[in-house]
Amino acid sequence: MKPRYREAAWLLFLFLLAWAPRALALDAYVSPDERKWLARSANFAYALSRGDFAQTFQREHPGVTVMWAGTLGLLGEYPTYPQEAPGYFTWEQENLEAWLKTNTDHAPLDLLAAGRSWIAFGVALTLWLCIFPLHRLIGRNAAHLAFIFMALDPFSVALSRQLHPDGFVASFIFLSLLHFLAWLYAGLHWRDLAISGVVMGLAWLTKTPAALLAPIGGVLVAGQMQRLWRRQQVLPEDPYGDRDAAVEQAKPHPSLLTPRPLQLLIAYVIWGAIAVATFFLLWPAMWGDPLGALMRMATEMEAYVEGHVNPNFFWGQPTGDPGIFFYPVAIFFRITPGVLIGLIAAAIFYFRQDWTFADLRTRRTVRALTFFVVVFVVAMTMPAKKFDRYVLPIFLALDVLAALGWLSLSLLPWRPDAPAWLQRLRAISPTAALLTLAFVLHGVFTLLTYPYYLTYYNPLAGGSRTAPAVLFVGWGEGLDAAARWLNAQPGSENFRVAAWYADGPFSYFSDSQVVPMGYSSPLSWLDTDYAVTYVNQWQRQLPSPAAVTWFAAQTPAFEVHKDGLTLARVYDLRNTLLPPFIDLNTAPAADFGGAIRLIGVELPQGQMAAGAEQLVTFYLQALAPMSTNYNALVRLVAPDGAELWRADGWPWGAPTSAWPVREVRPDGYTLTIPSDAAPGLYQLVLSFYDPTTLAPLPATPVRGGDPLPAGEQKVALIQIGAPANAGVTPLASPYTLGDVAYLAGAMLPTTAPPGAPVTLQLQWETLATPAADYTLFVHLVDGAGALAAQQDQPPLGGFAPTHTWQPGQRIVDMVTLTLPPDLAPGRYTVRVGLYTGDVRLPVSQSGAVVGDFAVVGEIIVP
């Protein structure tokens, strides 16, 4: 094969090496932002088709190149989209997905994968083009090895196969920088400057951090201008002078011409002008109102960088700003052992100026790349919003520097002073051996983590074993596997699944109804069959620490594991009434006739004034198909049974015969208190009945218990007017019973004869609404603690079961204890407590537990 054909075949192989890992399995998983970029791309295509160029502004990034790629993919799969689309889609919510599934045969995942294919091709091509300026900057062998490092970098591969700006902007920034360095250090060819300017414009069109290229280029040009000014003043023997400039004077380098400083400055301005022209020409939003578009970019970007909507995670803690150490730690976790070893070798050989680093142009390139890395990391550290992917461009620079280090290592056996054992490596091609070792310590991690490349973490930093304790982990990978597992379950098409990263990462793969995992709304949970939680959700304690703690105590039905990481967990909630971290009162949950379930109630206030009103919402679920259109009956009744208020009718205002099984409906009523209502405690009760026969549906508490009288469930105790003030003597030190209530006062006689009834008054101040119904006990015990008499009863004789108590209420209860007729004379202690089943609530005073009963006084029996 002729040399030029052999070189062409080798270059084609190198391109395929970069393209293949980025282009395979493009439908493997979806990252959270990609469904937004798919919608933006659809809007971009729609705007172009109608000449509505202002609408090509979709995001402050601005992400134009990403939208061009998405548009090419979209129109390749769905060429008639601009004619059939109903208009522009908002990308904050997944409206495009719903429209596609309802109106077309095109799956969002297929359209996304098509757009991704253009990203993968574009990034692979851009990285491949880096070979040519690198060839002139650091030599052919080093350029090819550097490209191999870039092509197989697992972090770069992971982010350069997504419909997202990070992969594109990193490759554009780096190609522009390399051509700029080739112009500056390898001949001052205008072609390099023009290419760099065009690619910088593409980088600007992709993501705003690319603007850092301009000041970085300015500093590099200033450095070169300074060298020109000092060139004749530095002597080779000056130990404190510019050593490279001295070498340059002693032996002029072929790449160092003698331009005037002003010429460099003019070229720098031209470079920027080319980038500006590219920016304007390729973004239609610039064609109409460029100043308005730029102002909008600046305004929106200022808000974007202020901080995270949800907290980040760093060093074991959720945080709004990970601080100055975030990027050094993140970089260490994301680079490979091969890059780390190569960087150490590069630093050593650079300062020794040995082998590869003996070349002046190479050293200047190394300094420029190092400067780029430092400036870019420092600049990205300033905003509060930080992610490891934001510094992806510097990984390409580190790959080049590491390749130089490995290439220098491979030449060690040829050193004249090399040890004999090292010289023996000459016979076994040390270059091939070291390059193989470099691949094992670098590229192999890309193969091992396919297709979830983001699960790679540096094993020298502890890998996936320690990463979840240090860094934000997971960007959608694994949710596809969770969705596929659920799809395999019987009846999955009828499931309702609450998932983290619901829109896109989960919904694109799921056959079920998918809803986002809500923060507090009961409707996000009440009819949910499964919940899918995610690794960075656990890390950041989202949606709340209480939710994360509750899920951690449950046994997942399925887990997704990859590369030592637990990425996602699936929980079966079908037999769970409601997770306790949801702020909904489920204490009165009851089933009515096996057809309707009261899951919970929202009652904003437990105290109301006469004439006041408030909205009461019952969350009701259909348990079975209903042929009868039942009515709901809601009443507010007094202790004597008198009705103060009522409302009835179809629940949710709809016939129950059309109520889909398992659907939850919020049934709201405006509870209105008559202006002449007497102060006191009233009970809100709920029942259902057949309007034809007036027969009520039988009711049973969900948590177990006897059938409820008259099919009515007591829902909530409501205090109207001022709380009762019965003159009960306050206790010197009130007792707290569990987290339910505290006993603030008691009134009882000091003496009572045997056989006499003894009436006690107890004043309770409620703290919470317990799910259980507690029974009140009053015990009379002698000096030895032996039981002499007792009375057990529900509060207020059953009118106010504890599941209806509302926080902040006062309940004055009256208990009558009958003394035995043969009770011996003496001093007896009265004990009070609450229990359910055979378990009593703990009792405490001043924060210290004193037992399971409260001592409220003594009675002397004469």
Image (tube, grey):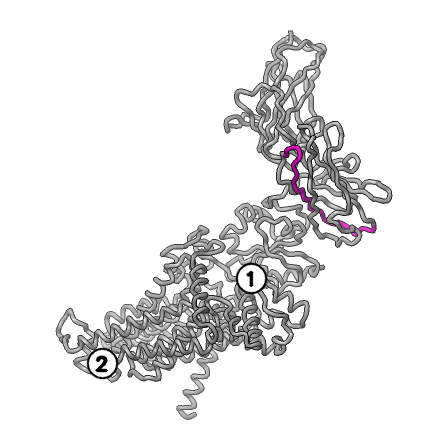
Image label count: 2
Residue type at mark 1: give it.
Glu
Q: Quadrant of residue 753?
A: top right
The image shows residue 677, relative to residue 790, as above or below, that is: below
Label 2 environment density (alpha carbons within 10 Å; few <14, some 14–19, many ≥20): few
Q: Secondary structure at mark 1?
A: loop
Answer yes or no: is residue 142 visible. Answer: no
Q: Nearer the viewer, residue 226 or 641?
A: 641
Answer yes or no: is residue 442 visible. Answer: yes
Q: Residue furthest bottom?
A: 2
Q: Position of residue 46 (x, y in %)?
A: 58, 74
Residue type at mark 2: give it.
Arg
Q: Position of residue 677 (x, y in %)?
A: 69, 30
- Spatial separation of the CA atoms under disc 2 and disc 1: 53 Å
The mark found on residue 92 in the picture is: 1
Q: Which residue is mark 2?
A: 260
Magenta-colored stretch includes residue 618: yes
The image shows residue 253, relative to residue 409, as above or below, that is: below
* Magenta region: 608-627
